[in-house]
Amino acid sequence: MASHANCALENRVTDPFVDVLTPAALQFIAALHREFAPARQQVLQGRKAAAELRLQGDGFEFPDAGISIREDLAWRVPPAPPDLQDRRVEIASPADNRKVVINALNAGAQVWIADLEDAMSPTWNNAMSSQRNLRDAIHGTLAYEDTQGKRYQVQGDIPAIMVRPRGWHLPEKHLHVDGQETSASLVDFGLYMFHCAKAQLDRGSGPYFYLPKLESQADARLWHNIFNFAEHQLSLPQGSIRATVIIEHIGAAFQMQEILHALGPHATGLTAGRWDYLFSIARAFRLQADLVLPDRAELTMDRPFLQAYTRLLIQTCHQRGAHAIGGVATQIPDRHDEAARTRAVTAVRLDKEHEAQEGFDGTWVIHPDLVPVCHAAWAPVLADRPNQINQSPAAITIHATDLWNGQAIPGHVTEPGLRASIAVSVSIWMAGCVATARSNCLD
């Protein structure tokens, strides 16, 4: 058993990653845990209480406590750093596989999202390998050679990097501080900050994050406090850390303004996480028999409640000077099946052209072949501008009932649709991962 600053880890998990789990890095993790473990537990307890109210029949409303924030038209988030001004195409990938990381960095996107959450099975090896690969990418030492001797390396300058840590609900059971399990969020955040923040600032970038699974402004306020603490501990300029929040929980949709406001100088934008957003609705109202969602294939973005969600996100962001980023394209073009590839590219092109026209500042994909498709979708809309922040759509009033009215969603619930959902769940479980490619899409 290895112990540093009362951080306890078994030698079998420490030894392969001694370059990541240095005594100083562990000391920083310990400081984060001691400062914020109680506040994290309060956030989780608040989520549990809110979820219990939903199961008892309560709906969602714009909170009265946020009226002053929403009605104050004076406040705006700080301008994005230079390398985050243009975010028209972002590519997300797991960070534990060096070849995948290199291909993502070479894809030609403006931003690489190192996804330590939905794209990563949360094993210790994956989490620590991701930290090593991030460090090596930023320091220019990332390379990979496959079994046939083909060598992969980063070509030219790397794009802006945003790290998506694991959510607040996940513990990191391999690392204990003062006898307590640590937060997976704090481990992911802390190790990246310790090893990479100063190097990112030195190269003219910064430590940028995608915050997942937030449910309310309380989650954002906790992150704000953590960011301030980390900047002080690491002697970084205030406001160096910038964050974009993925609105992928229905509760967060009712507090978009409050979430941006709570992040303060660290806020940069919001992203439409549409698939998890739908799941959050299904989970919140799972005991109400009259609110069963139709087949997933019928839950398209032209549904009125989803249109209200994206319009409110764009309006909120542009009113406050923040980026509004569209939903992820989960299609995987098949390079060996031209017909399937054409279908995937066409679907993405139409979706992204619609997002660009709707007012989004950019979008994200999971496959390098879709990067030029998205660039082409945004080119005629943006022209020589980096974003559409200063071009707000016509102001419309979105009511709480527009986002969710508590009534059944029209559509069909079919046996093939149910079987398809079960097949996704089983394939993910059997693969031992959190996402799987199926029918040329990532589920």
Image: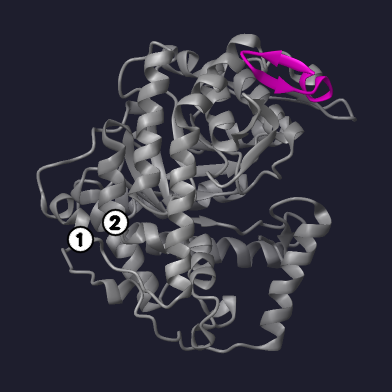
Image x and y of residue 272, in percent: 42, 56
Quadrant of the frame with the N terminus: top right
State the image quarter where residue 219 is shown.
top left
Residue at position x 66%, y 25% in the image:
133
Three-letter residue code for mark 1: Asp
Above or below 335: residue 250: below
Q: Nearer the viewer, mark 1 or mark 2?
A: 1
In this rendered view, identify the residue nearer to me: 410 or 113: 410
Residue at position x 54%, y 79% in the image:
287
State the image quarter where residue 334 is shown.
bottom right
Q: Is residue 233 left or right of residue 308?
A: right
In this rendered view, identify the residue nearer to me: 173 or 235: 173
- Which numbered marker is on residue 129? none
Q: Is residue 27 left or right of residue 75?
A: right
Magenta residues, start to end: 1-14
Three-letter residue code for mark 2: Ile
Image x and y of residue 406, in percent: 38, 81
Q: Is residue 4 magenta?
A: yes
Image x and y of residue 72, in percent: 10, 49
Residue at position x 73%, y 65% in the image:
425
Disc on the earlier residue, 1 or 2 = 1
- Give the spatial CA distance, label 1 vs label 2: 22 Å
How many numbered marks have been drawn onto this rendered protein structure? Answer: 2
Q: Is residue 7 magenta?
A: yes
Residue at numbered disc 2: 314
Residue at numbered disc 1: 64
The furthest residue to the front: 179
Q: Counting other residues with Cα less than 10 Å from the Cα at mark 1, is it few (<14), some (14-19), or many (20 or more)?
A: few
SS of the residue at dot 1? helix
Q: Are marks 1 and 2 in contact (CB under 8 Å)?
A: no
Quadrant of the frame with the C terminus: bottom right
